[in-house]
Image (tube, grey):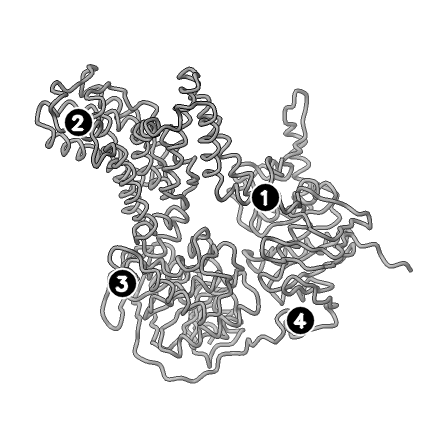
Amino acid sequence: MMAPIPALRLEGIVKTFPGVRALDGVSFEVLPGEVHALLGENGAGKSTLMKTLAGMHQPNEGRIFIEENEVVMRTPLEAKAKGVVLIHQELSLAEEMSAAENIYLGELPTKSFGRVDWKTLYAQAGEILKRLNCKFGPQTRVSDLSIANKQMVEIARALTVNAKAVIFDEPTASLTDAEKVVLFDIIRDLKARGVGIVYISHRMEEIFTISDRISVLRDGTYRGTLVTAETNEDEVTQLMIGRSLDLSRNEAQVEFGDVALEVRGLSCGSLYRDITFNVRSGEVVGFYGLVGAGRTEIAETLFGLRTPSAGTILLEGKEVRISSPVDAIANGISLVPESRKEQGLVLGMNCRDNITLPQVDDLTAGPFVSDGAELAIFEQYRDRLEIKTPSWRQAVGNLSGGNQQKIVIGKWLAMRPNVLIVDEPTRGIDVGSKAEIHNLIRELARSGYAVIVISSEMPEVLHVSDRVIAMYSGEIIREFTAAEVTEDNLVQAISGIRADKVA
Amino acid sequence: MADPRLKSIGDLLARQGILIAFAIFLVGFAVFSDRFLTPENLETVIRQAAIIGVMAIGVTVVVIGGNLDLSVGSMLSFSTVLVVDLHDKIGPELAIIVMLAATLVLGAINGFLVGVARLNSLIVTLGMLSAIQGLTLIYTGGKNVDILDQETTWFAIFGRGHILGIATPILMFLGLALFMHVVMAYTPFGRRVYAVGGNPTAAVFSGIRRSRLVFSTYLISAFTTGIAALILGSRVMGSQNNVGQGYELLVLAGVILGGTSLLGGSGNILKTVIGVLILGFIQNGLLLMGFPYYAQWLVTWVVIILAVWLDIAAKRGRLLSPIA
């Protein structure tokens, strides 16, 4: 039997940006009916490769083949016409239009005089949505859809062309477990129809669930391809970062200090109710729960971004009123927010200025910002967190996700807080940086910080926390010590099963 | 596309495009008119550009903070009318104080609506543009105002005087620009303005009081407009009700020519100065070359479009967007 013709094949792709060789002779192929996972740390070249495939970047060298015909794709439209579709991590839909209009955007069926043929449009779009098992109709406005359903619209868009290869970039980043199952069904369905699928994700367990082969990039070079069924997470991680990742349970037995933060009966409308907990200095308390359980809202209240409707907050035993981030900072509370790009960083600003932003008022010589004081802080946290940047002048937007996250953490460590709240510390960053950030959180606790970690990843919560608080629908269901907590009882707790019924 | 020389020319244009354009204009006009490069003419141009320039300094701060201020034109009319009218009634010292206070109140209204109430700055300041025009007409009852004793009043110093042999408007313009440049580039306040313009949410999450900051940027643009009114009133020694009409666009043109992004978060006061001077030199050069006065409006428009286009083209490496 002849070897199958690859749906998409790249040969020796080189792509350089000023000062960076983003891709250095990368070759890669995806066969029809195959799910080929693409792995690599942030900055390894995945995004660049993907954008090259989708016609958003032109390679400096190398060739691209679709079904062994060499092609040049100058624009995303051209790529799509040739059968290569990219499903973005950040969705690109027209929010105010219907699902159907989005699906056929740019190629709406028309009647005479260029009028839109709504009947045909809705019928065709409805057909595709049905094929995807979507519960919403083609006339639904996109802004009314959940993120998962918006993603379905993106996928539906891919199905309007005769796609030969579909690239999924971190598709599950904002999906719930149930939605993930639906997505995987769709991927399997595409696969069964002979579409080649490139699947990019940081989440190891997904890759092992869905993929047939795994290719790894590191520092812009191709490191090898493994057959999923014949490998394991450790081998893949080794290939990615050159060592293995420790996600063992946290079993450290340490003496904690005094209670640094205590929260009594805190409520905020319908977001969360009657929240009571404390954090000692030297301790990491993990908040685990589903998206929407109220964890982020509690963090935002502690940081003065929301006003609680009832309850008290005590710092070192004294009641405090926190009505703005300014108050929170003055009281020694730092928040590393959930979304680093929207809430954590000014992307156009340089690394140094981002790190010193919350305290720029105090870093002055006379009326002026002191260059020396700022640089000292930048260098201290660059070295401590091993932030990789060519210079402090580099705009933060040009750094990889892991390094951006370290800048946000550095910015808040530099405030020398008593209580550090970290919301989703490793969202969207690669395995290597993840381990570094986990170690850092443990290390911070050891040096006396009271740390709250909010995370949706169970291994992460189990790995870093001394205590775990499980939340469901705005309430604390149960509090576990590191010794008590298991994956099973934690899953039960966050699914809304009461502790007393479990016990 | 892959020609490295083309790339470096693009880079150069992106970084220093405005300076290069400036140099080309100066050389061009110098070749076509022998009066252009004389010290007298240069002084005239800078002196005339000073009013727009002073206003553009404040507006640059607003724009870096992520907002617009289109009300400065009619604010200039109001403030000029006020200071000229009050000059003879309560004396120049009090007139100046009352005028500046009134101008700051107008700026505070802008600042409150945009900064605190979080209304869209385009709509707020466009509304203020017409509201202040109305206010001016109500104040004067439609009549023009002027200063009777034009020969002896010390008020003349702002528009007509010289200090150390340099025309006062030029000193005020360049002095204010230098001061504001230092504030924006080297003080915590400046840093906060860039942060709020670059990412308002992240700025709030960093403990910056965004409302207060935006409010103060509007006070600054009102203040610079008040100073511009001082120069204008003193130079003309009288004022029409609509003397500042259209200035908001010239001011904004100077800001844009200086490379300040209308999206906020980036920009530079000294480059705004150059942007304003380019506008001034174009207008002057065209007049000297014998073009009718009205030609300058067209040419100004072409220059702005070209400047913005080249800036974007240099950033993306081609003239037209690759995405249809």
* Whole-percent x, y for residue A6 in the image: 80, 54
> What kind of residue is marked 4?
Leu
Q: CA distance from mark 1 to mark 4?
A: 42 Å
> What kind of residue is marked 2?
Ala
Tell me which residue sits at (27%, 41%) in the image: B175
Task: Please tell me which of labels 1 and 4 falls first in the chain.
Answer: 1
Q: CA distance from mark 3 to mark 2?
A: 50 Å
Q: Are marks 1 and 3 on the same chain?
A: yes
Within the image, what quadrant is residue A428 found in?
bottom right
Q: Quadrant of the C terminus of chain B?
A: top right
Callout in the foreground (3, 2): 2
Q: Is residue B105 visible?
A: no
Q: Chain of mark 4?
A: A
Within the image, what quadrant is residue A107 found in?
top right
Q: Which residue is mark 4?
A: A239
Q: Which residue is mark 1?
A: A136
User: How would you rate the neighbour count of disc 4 (Cα within 10 Å): few for under 14, some for 14-19, many for 20 or more?
Assistant: many
* Whole-percent x, y for residue A36 in the image: 72, 60
Tell me which residue sits at (31%, 60%) in the image: A370
Q: Which residue is mark 2?
A: B156
Q: Which residue is mark 3?
A: A330
